[in-house]
Amino acid sequence: MSFSPNRPGKKRYRYRIANAPRFIAVIMLFLLVLTAIFVIAAKSEDEPSQKGAVVVTPIVYPTPDPDPTPPPIDIPEGKVMEPVLVVIDAGHGGEDGGTISPYKEGFYEKDITLSMAEKVAEYLKEKGIDVILTRDGDYRFSASNREDLLTRANIANENKASLFVSIHVNAYDLKYAGAAAVNGMEVYYMEKDGVYTEFTDERFAQLLNDEIVKANGIKSNGVKQNNYSVLRNTQMPAVLIETAYITNKEDHARLASEEFRSNTARGIVQGIELALKEIDAFEYNGDMYVFKEAKE
C-alpha cells in the first residue's frame, strides 16, 4: 500500500516572519554588540605593549638663580660710604645721679634719661634704623667725669656713628628767686667740621627741637651753642637735649609721666629720620648707608 506525499488528512506546517523589519533590526543590533566586544578584547590585548612603549619624561625645574649681586655703588670723589648708625647717650649713671628731684625722693636724672634712651632705641629699631646705646644700665664708665664723657664720645667715633644724641634733664638752683618757675627744654650743639654736605650740627639741633615740641607740647627755650664734652669730641653731627626742668613742678610731673617720655622719644626719632633724609641716607642691598667726607 503506497501513500502519496500529499495525501489527504496530513497537515503541513509553514513558517514565515511576522515582522521582517523588527527581525532585521534585532540582527543588526546583535552584530553591533558582537563587533564592540571584539574591538574591546583586541584593545585589551594591545594595552601591555602600548604601556611598555610609553616613556615618562620627568619635569625638570630650572635651578633658581642666586640673589643677583647689586651693582657697585659709585662713591663720589672725596667721600666714604658707611652704614647708617645712630648712637643714643643716656646722660649720667651709676654713682653720678645727675639732677635730683626736690619733690620726690629717689627720682634721679640718670633713670629718666635711660628710660627715654631705651624708648628711642626701640622706636628706631622698629623703623629699621641701626642704633646703639652708650649705656644700657645704671653705671658710668669712669669715676672721672672727664673720662666718662670721653668714653661716650669715643663709642660713637669708634663705631663710625652717623648721628649722636645725648639725653639729659635740666635743673635750676632753687635758692635763686624765681628758679622754680623756669621750665621748658633746650637743645645744644657745637658746630664742628662738617661730615655731610650742607648739613650742620645746628641744623640737626633745630630738627630735633622742632619735632620734640610737636610730639610732647613742651615749651622750647631754643637751640643753643655749647662746648659740652660729648659735642666737642664727637666726629659726627651731635646734640645734647635738656628735656625738661626737674626743679619745676609742671616739668617734674611731665618727667614722671610715661606718656611724656614716650612722646619725647618719638619726637627725637622723628627728628633723626628727617636728618637722615637731609644727609641723603640711602638703601643698598637691604641696609642703609650714608656718604661722609673722607678724612685724610
Image: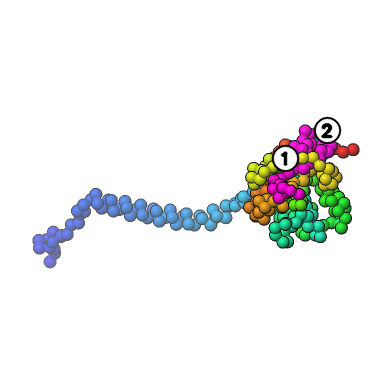
- Quarter of the picture holding the C terminus: top right
Please report the bounds of the magenta region as a residue range. Answer: 176-204
User: Disc 2 or 1, which lies upstream in sequence?
Assistant: 2
> Residue visible at 72% across and 57% down?
102
Q: In x, y percent, where is residue 209?
A: 70, 42
> Residue visible at 70% across and 58% down?
103
Q: Which residue is mark 2?
A: 77
Q: Callout 2, which amino acid?
A: Glu
Q: Which residue is mark 1?
A: 222
Residue placed most toward the observer, 63 or 276? 276
Secondary structure under the numbered disc 1 in the rendered image: strand
- Quarter of the picture holding the N terminus: bottom left
Q: In x, y percent, where is residue 212?
A: 68, 44
Q: Callout 1, which amino acid?
A: Gly
In this view, the residue farthest toward the left is 8
Residue placed most toward the observer, 169 or 281? 169
Q: Is residue 58 left or right of residue 23?
A: right
> Residue visible at 13% across and 64% down?
2
Secondary structure under the numbered disc 2 in the rendered image: loop
Q: CA distance from mark 2 to mark 1?
A: 37 Å
Assess whether residue 197 is covered by the magenta stretch.
yes
Query: Against 222, is 22 above or below?
Result: below
Asked whether residue 166 is in view, the answer is: yes
Report the number of numbered marks: 2
Image disc number at residue 150: none
Q: Nearer the viewer, mark 2 or mark 1?
A: 1
